[in-house]
Image (cartoon, rainbow, N blue to C red):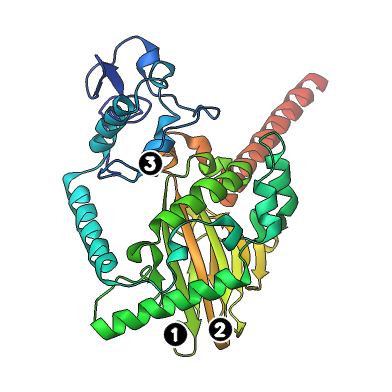
């Protein structure tokens, strides 16, 4: 989100930590009221159960409001939903430029044109149905009571390399249905000659699931499942406040994209699940977590990890974890990806240096400075001791 920065403040006048309310109206730019209760919280109220905003027609995704609500000051948490909505909408409009809102509106019209003309093959995919989608072990972990849910989720997750987590997730039947749905969509695109947007600049094949009606399903996947996993394993990159996503499938094979170069994702947390089909090759390779400054820095031996895909099995990692995909040498491989984002984290990390603690190179530089400081201090003490001895 675009932000106009103030001249004499480390926070922009309209940042979440610096926006105030005057008579129930969001204000920014001038002096904020001295009453600290009128400011948004820097840290979310994790125990607050946010309202649902799905039924409101608005220019921002409903999940963004549900996520931002946890940052409201205490005196606004229990006011009517409309009051909270108007307050948060005013804040968000200050971040979003007119050009961004225009692009978003055009994208909505593009999606509506697809949804109005494309006939789904399996309508049951367009509503979240956990018992149909997920394997029993995954579902059981999330059905645990609130006191034991974190430990239950941890019990089904494996960490084959630092910062990379895997678990069995999708049922074979669901994978088959989603593959057929994507094939049906691609057939419709070919027959109607409809120009669609591909998932990203790297993939020439594949489809954006959000664009042909599956946004609601993927919203629930992120909100009810991935956000809880991320809160446990990725709190340092805003895993607790994921509020938007980009959901798509990618296709690899001799007549599709063959491989994917070394890159980072435009996400805080990435979910990647292999759907099938029969294939060889296509392993993911990981090469360490980096911030924007160090994305092209050296890779160290302990950061090297290769991961072979298995249908239905999920891999979850930070978006800034550098990775790529090796060539699919035979067959046809299709993967579901969900790039999960946190607008709150993206704003806060501009102003808080400690958000770079996830970067391997930043950690090494910090350790290097510490060792240099210790060495300098030792040298200084040795000189002093020598002077005393003489």
Label 2: which secondary element: strand
Residue at 47% x, 44% y is: 242
Q: Nearer the viewer, residue 318 or 175?
A: 175
* Among the 4 quarters of the image, the one containing residue 17: top left
Instruction: Identify the residue shown where x is 60% and y is 85%.
Output: 279
Apparent side of residue 37 relative to residue 168 in the rendered image (left or right): left
Which residue is identified by label 1? 256
The label nearer to you, 3 versus 2, is 3
User: Of 250 and 142, which appears nearest the observer?
Assistant: 142
What kind of element bears circle 3?
A: helix
Q: Is residue 3 above or below residue 296?
A: above
Q: Which residue is mark 2?
A: 328
Q: In which quadrant will I find the N terminus?
A: top left
The residues tagged by marks 1 and 2 sit, at their Cα atoms, a distance apart of 10 Å
Q: Earlier in the sequence, mark 3 or mark 2?
A: 3
Pointer 1 with pointer 2, Cβ within 8 A: yes
Q: Within 10 angstroms of label 1, few (less than 14), some, or many (20 or more) residues?
A: some
Q: Secondary structure at mark 1?
A: loop
Above or below 256: residue 377: above
The residue carrying mark 3 is 64
- Front residue of 154/159: it is 154
- Distance, label 1 to label 3, CA atoms, is 35 Å
Q: Say which label, 1 or 3, has the lower sequence index.
A: 3
Counting from the top left corner in percent of width and height, residue 204 is at 37, 78
Q: Is residue 275 above or below residue 170?
A: below
* Residue 14 position (above or below residue 250): above
Task: Tell whether label 3 touches label 1 (CB within 8 Å).
Answer: no
Among numbered discs 1 and 2, the one appearing first in the sequence: 1
- Residue 128 position within the rendered picture, expressed as x and y whole percent measured from the top left: 49, 56
């Amino acid at each position: 989100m675009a932000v106009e920065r103030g001249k004499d403040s480390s926070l922009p006048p309209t940042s979440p930590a610096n926006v105030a309310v005057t008579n129930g109206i969001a204000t920014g730019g001038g002096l904020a009221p001295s009453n600290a209760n009128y400011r948004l919280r820097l840290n979310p109220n994790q125990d607050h159960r946010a309202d649902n905003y799905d039924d409101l027609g608005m220019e921002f995704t409903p999940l963004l409001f549900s996520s931002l609500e946890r940052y409201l000051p205490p005196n606004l948490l229990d006011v009517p939903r409309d009051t909270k909505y108007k307050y948060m909408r005013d804040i968000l409009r200050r971040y979003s430029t007119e050009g961004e809102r225009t692009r978003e509106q055009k994208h909505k019209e593009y999606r509506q044109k697809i949804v109005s003309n494309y006939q789904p093959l399996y309508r049951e995919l367009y509503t979240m149905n956990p018992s149909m989608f997920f394997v029993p072990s995954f579902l059981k972990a999330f059905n645990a009571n609130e006191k034991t849910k974190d430990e239950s989720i941890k019990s089904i997750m494996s960490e084959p390399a630092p910062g990379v987590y895997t678990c069995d997730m999708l049922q074979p039947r669901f994978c088959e249905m989603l593959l057929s749905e994507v094939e049906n969509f691609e057939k419709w695109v070919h027959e109607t000659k409809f120009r669609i947007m591909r998932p990203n600049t790297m993939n020439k094949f594949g489809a954006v699931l959000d664009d042909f009606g599956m946004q609601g399903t993927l919203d629930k996947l992120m909100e009810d499942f991935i956000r809880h996993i991320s809160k446990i394993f990725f709190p340092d990159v805003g895993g607790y406040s994921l509020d938007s996503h980009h959901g798509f499938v990618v296709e690899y094979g001799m007549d599709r994209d063959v491989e994917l170069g070394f890159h980072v994702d435009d996400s805080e947390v990435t979910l990647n699940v292999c759907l099938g089909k029969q294939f060889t090759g296509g392993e993911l390779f990981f090469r360490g977590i980096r911030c924007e400054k160090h994305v092209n820095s050296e890779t160290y031996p302990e950061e090297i990890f290769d991961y072979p895909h298995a249908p239905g099995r999920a891999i979850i990692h930070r978006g800034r974890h550098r990775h790529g995909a090796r060539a699919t040498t035979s067959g046809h491989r299709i993967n579901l990806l969900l790039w999960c984002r946190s607008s709150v984290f993206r704003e806060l990390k501009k102003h808080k240096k400690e958000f770079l603690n996830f970067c391997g190179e930043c950690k090494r530089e910090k350790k290097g400075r510490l060792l240099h400081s210790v060495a300098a201090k030792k040298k200084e003490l040795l000189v002093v001791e020598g002077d005393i001895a003489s």
